[in-house]
Amino acid sequence: MYRKYRYRPLDNTKGSVRLLKLHAAPDRDWPIRCSLFHTTFSEAPPYIALSYVWGESTGSLLVTVDTNHVCVTPNLKHALQRLRPRPGEQDLVMWVDAICINQEDIPERNIQTKNMRAIYQHAASVAVFLGLENNRSAAAMLFGHELNTCASADEVRRLVRDPKQKESIEGLVALFRRQYWWRIWVIQEISSSRKATVFCGDDEISWTELDRVCDLLREASDELQSLFYKHPSYIRTLTFGGPRGLQLSRFSRNISVPPLLELLLSHKSKKSTDPKDKVYALIGVSESDDAFGIIDYSHSVREVYTHTARHIITSSQRLDVICVKQNDVDQYDLPSWAPDWTRPSSNSGATVVGLHHHQPPFAASGDTLANFKFLSHGYVLRVSGFIIATIETIGMAFIQRPRRPPSEVAPILEAFHDWWNIFVGSHSNSTAAQALFGRTISCGNWDHNDPQIYATKLEAIFALSDDLLSDSDVLRLNPPSRSSTLTQLGSSTPSLADDDNSIQGGEEEKIQLSAILSAGLTMNRRRLFVSQDNLVGLAPACAELGDVICVLLGCRYPVVLRRKGGHYLLVGEAYMDGYMYGEAVRGLTISVDELDGFIIY
């Protein structure tokens, strides 16, 4: 008979926490029994903190706590079954969020969430539970152990080359893509731990060993390229996924307490059951831990995300945060300048590659600080800057659709041709103009001293499209002059549109494919524009004619604003060649008061 467990309130004046004692059982199928007790960090016995994914709530199961019951997800039940002591062994003292926090008590959740870092810091160790054995996970864990026994890079390469290990390596890809690695709370749990052990089914490996696997596999990058030439994403998963994807910041790796914006950008692809946790889970390991304010789950997502943007702007005196746009739909009625940090749906296609990824960092406003003020209870932002262009001509929007095979480049080529036709309508097709076009469609990632390199890349793309778009209605106006070499290359691309096996083609095909896929990364969710003064750039896919391109004080990137009555809406960031490194503010002699003011809703 079900009897709901009644939690006794914690004494928050003493900083108390609940721990559970997990009781032994004769076999895995025995019902899970445990008991709860209150303690403080200074008085607590050694305990293990559990790090896991809640998983689906459907099919929730009962755990006996004292003489009553708590509902848990199937994945948590599997974790407790895997970790509980055997007969004759002592009870295992643990901290498990779903049981040790009264999830129905919002004030308690607020306080315990604030204590989360301390909970994992004080734990004797952290148990990471990845789930049950499947998809060759046992072989993957064994392969991880074997890699760690290699005494040299040559031994690592020999092990990876061994045909018998291919399935184990594929199992490691699956292991590194489990839901655990996408959970936002894991960042804080792992970064705060003294030591951790990873459990998957009946197998286990130390966190240190599993994390080292990524470094070891980078030693065998050529072997991985040969093994997975049809699946380049596997290589990135093996070398930058799994445990390596949980490093605190991708931007300041040597800082133990990074800025909150760096953490939000580093982990914006992570998932959370509660959208507010995309922020709350990172506060405790950021430099905003003391200054952010109260963590309160009774606040709406709109309140939390807007407060987060205000906090970052105020604490950094910069506007970079307003440029983050990863969701097409305004699902929380946010101001246009406040980012939505939730992970976009997998059905929405590839996410935009933000300008914050560029190295060296852009600095459109030079070293200026933001001049800002919050209005209307903090939901309206007034900033200073100036307009540098107005969009007069605009190209088709390119949005990479979901679940496309790597070799399906025809949609990218169609957008490329549309943009090229617009570009040559206002510019020549000289080598210098081709360099400008190449830098623009790549958002500055194509950065070559020799302009001829840009021309070569564009020629490779045109050679590829001659075959793939031969039956389409795309009209190519005034193409670049074509070398005999690349004209010949264009005739050697008969099969790229057919299937992924085309990637196995000749070097010419790989060069062509590499050029368009490289451009496609930054073309995605953007469109080309030309201004009234023939300035060219890339704007968000939703940009429109008449939108203005502005440089705002304290913002690394130009932004697109849209007039709406007496105010503006922020459309997003823009790339404008020649305006990304402070050119617009260099030698500026007017005062801040003389700059344009923009009121952004």
Image: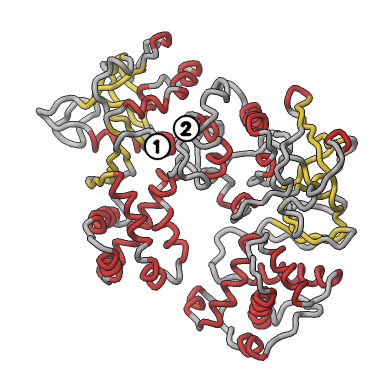
Residue at 60% in and 23% down: 299
Pointer 2 and pointer 1: residues touching (CB < 8 Å)? yes
- Residue 296: give x, y in percent of width and height: 55, 21
The residue depicted at 56 percent of the width and 20 percent of the height is 294
Q: Amino acid at mark 1?
A: Ser
Q: Amino acid at mark 2?
A: Val
Residue at x 23% of width, y 35% of height: 83
Density class for disc 2 (Cα within 10 Å; few <14, some 14-19, many ≥20) is: many
- Residue 486 vertical placement versus 189 (above, below): below
Element on which disc 2 rests:
loop
**Which dot marks residue 551?**
none
Q: Is residue 19 left or right of residue 546?
A: left
Q: Which quadrant would the N terminus be assigned to in this image?
A: top left
Residue 520 appears in view = yes
The residue tagged 1 is: 191
Q: Is residue 324 above or below residue 172?
A: above
The image's colour scheme reads secondary structure
Q: Position of residue 279 (x, y in %)?
A: 55, 33
Question: Residue 47 appears in which quarter of the rendering?
Answer: top left
Which residue occupies 15% across, 25% down? 90
Under tag 1, what secondary structure?
A: helix
Query: Which residue corresponds to mark 2?
Result: 285
Q: CA distance from mark 2 to mark 1?
A: 8 Å
- Residue 459: x %, y % from top left: 67, 79
Q: Is residue 473 visible?
A: no
In the image, residue 68 above or below residue 380: above
Horizontal side, residue 466 vs residue 94: left or right: right
